[in-house]
Image (cartoon, rainbow, N blue to C red):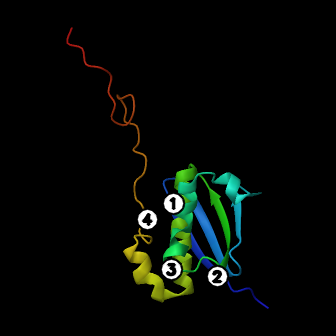
Amino acid sequence: MSIVQYYGTGRRKTSVARVYLRPGKGNLKLMVVKRIRDFESYFPLKNHKLTINKPLTVTNTVDNFDIYISVKGGGLSAQASAIKLGIARALLEYNSELRPVLKKAGLLTRDPREKERKKYGLLKARKASQYHKR
């Protein structure tokens, strides 16, 4: 007997989220760096919770799946965005007819913004030391 599950990978900045959707009652299990954490205490801000649940609310599948998440790297906001993309991709694997709805909500596009590297001769990526004439 095999368990039916749908997989999606989400990335944002340096964080990577692996998301598994299994048919269930809407439970959420979060694993951060090989430790199971409580979802409510790990993402205390309402903004992060709304970001993560957006693909499910847009497609009206909030209580249809148990979600298992493994996330590492980055900060909380980047992790929340990575989880959002992972859930959206897993929902596509579940039902490809959800694509127009997810696409219209902008949930299938990976955010390409990354931190710019520091250049030599400068203090930061673009910040230079103050110019002095004399």
**Which three-letter amino acid code belongs to the residue tagged 1?**
Ser
Residue type highlighted by circle 4: Arg
Q: How many marks?
A: 4
Real-space Cα separation, disc 4 to disc 3, in angstroms: 19 Å
Classify mark 2: helix, strand or loop. loop
For label 4, the crowd category at 10 Å Cα-Cα, with few meaning under 14, some 14 to 19 and many 20 or more, is some
The earlier-in-sequence mark between 3 and 1 is 3
Q: Callout 3: few (<14), some (14-19), or many (20+) C-alpha neighbours within 10 Å?
A: some
Distance of label 3 from label 2 (alpha carbons): 11 Å
Looking at the rendered structure, the kind of residue marked 3 is: Thr
User: Residue 20 placed where, x, y %?
Assistant: 65, 74
Considering every residue shown, the one lying at the far top of the view is 134
Badge 2 crowding class, 10 Å Cα cut-off, few under 14, some 14 to 19, many 20 or more, is: some
Please give the residue where the numbered disc 1 appears in the rendered image.
Answer: 81
Seen from this angle, which residue lies furthest bottom? 1
The residue under the point 29% across, 20% down is 130
Q: Of the residues under marks 4 and 1, which one precedes in the sequence? A: 1
